[in-house]
Amino acid sequence: MRFTALACLLAAPLAFGLLPATASAQQPLRTAVDGTFAPHAFPKLDGGVQGFNVDLFTEVAKRMGRPITIDSASFSGLVPALNAGRYDFLAAPVTVTQERAENLLFAEGYLYTAFQFGIRKGSAPITGMEELRGKAIAVNKGSAYDAWAQQNAGKYGFTVQTYDSQPDAVQAVVAGRAYATLGGNTVVRYAATRTPQLVPDFVIKETRAHWAAPFRKDNAALRDEVENVLECLKKDGTVAKLSEKWFGVKPAADDAENTIFPGYGVPGMPGYDDKPHEPRCG
């Protein structure tokens, strides 16, 4: 599935101080999302995909004066496709971890994420991790939640079920095949609004991290260009407005949607460039 959004070609790329006025500036940005990861990206009835991340990076491309193509694929295949050169960056929300930052180059975070469990309505709420012993946890294969579950299954005594999409993991809980699903807080809350039998539950507070766009290690120039636009979108309130539209909650002043982080990348992570700069906004 491919969604193509043409950037506004009337907008001069030089207005943002990002790209030279050459034909290469009009080459489409190639990117991808997990098209089953609502409300970040999910199918439209008339074809293509919609969601927070689709809107966000379509606007990024528009302000760069470039078209963009957004593919929809399984999350587990996105990073390999990026590294193989199929994509310029990933529009899918990717949790920034130490391991990922050692192998990829990230722009600054546009959202904070925290790990949250979703359980079937009527199930006993989770009040502590020790209550997971003997239970099955459903996760989206290849995600940060999958990695966390695999690493901690022995410690807390639960088993892990992996699925090709987050909706499949949710259905495993609704159908009684798993006790809980583990995902990002925004996704679990949104899934609960669409699936009455799912209830947002325990949040693992120490897991708060940045959701950010990854690039290949050799593409720092494009990372910096995209980050500049993201900072402009934060500065004029666009990211916060999109967040409220798709997640139903107005971001706080200190949330990532409203925070322009110093330097380029995620502070404290490999690949971070602490070079001071001010966003160049048209």
Image: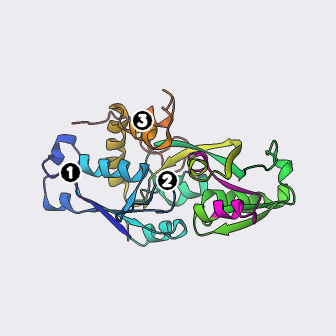
**Badge 3 is on which residue?**
240
- Calculate the distance from the C-alpha at mark 1 to the C-alpha at mark 2: 23 Å
Looking at numbered disc 2 in the image, what kind of residue is underneath it?
A: Pro
Label 3's element? helix
Q: Is residue 254 left or right of residue 227?
A: right
For the residue carrying disc 3, how many other residues have a C-alpha within 10 Å: few (<14), some (14-19), or many (20+)? many
Going from the N terminus, do you reach mark 1 or mark 2 first? 1
Going from the N terminus, do you reach mark 3 or mark 2 first? 2
For the residue carrying disc 1, how many other residues have a C-alpha within 10 Å: few (<14), some (14-19), or many (20+)? many
Along the viewing direction, whichever of 24 and 149 lies nearer the viewer: 149
Labels 1 and 2 touching (C-beta < 8 A):
no
Residue that appears at 50% across and 55% down: 38
- Calculate the distance from the C-alpha at mark 3 to the C-alpha at mark 2: 16 Å
Residue that appears at 61% across and 53% down: 195
From the top left corner, tell me how far across and down residue 7 is, in percent: 22, 53
Looking at numbered disc 3 in the image, what kind of residue is underneath it?
A: Ala
Residue that appears at 15% across and 52% down: 9
**Badge 1 is on which residue?**
65
Q: For the view shown, which residue lies furthest in the top direction?
A: 253
Residue 182 drawn in magenta: yes
Foreground: disc 3 or disc 2: 3
- Calculate the distance from the C-alpha at mark 3 to the C-alpha at mark 1: 22 Å
Q: Which residues are magenta?
A: 169-189
Q: Quadrant of residue 76?
A: bottom right
Foreground: disc 3 or disc 1: 3
From the top left corner, tell me how far across and down residue 75 is, in percent: 52, 65
Quadrant, the C terminus: top left
Going from the N terminus, do you reach mark 3 or mark 1 first? 1
Looking at numbered disc 1 in the image, what kind of residue is underneath it?
A: Gly
Residue 161 drawn in magenta: no
**Badge 2 is on which residue?**
93
Residue 278 drawn above or below residue 179: above
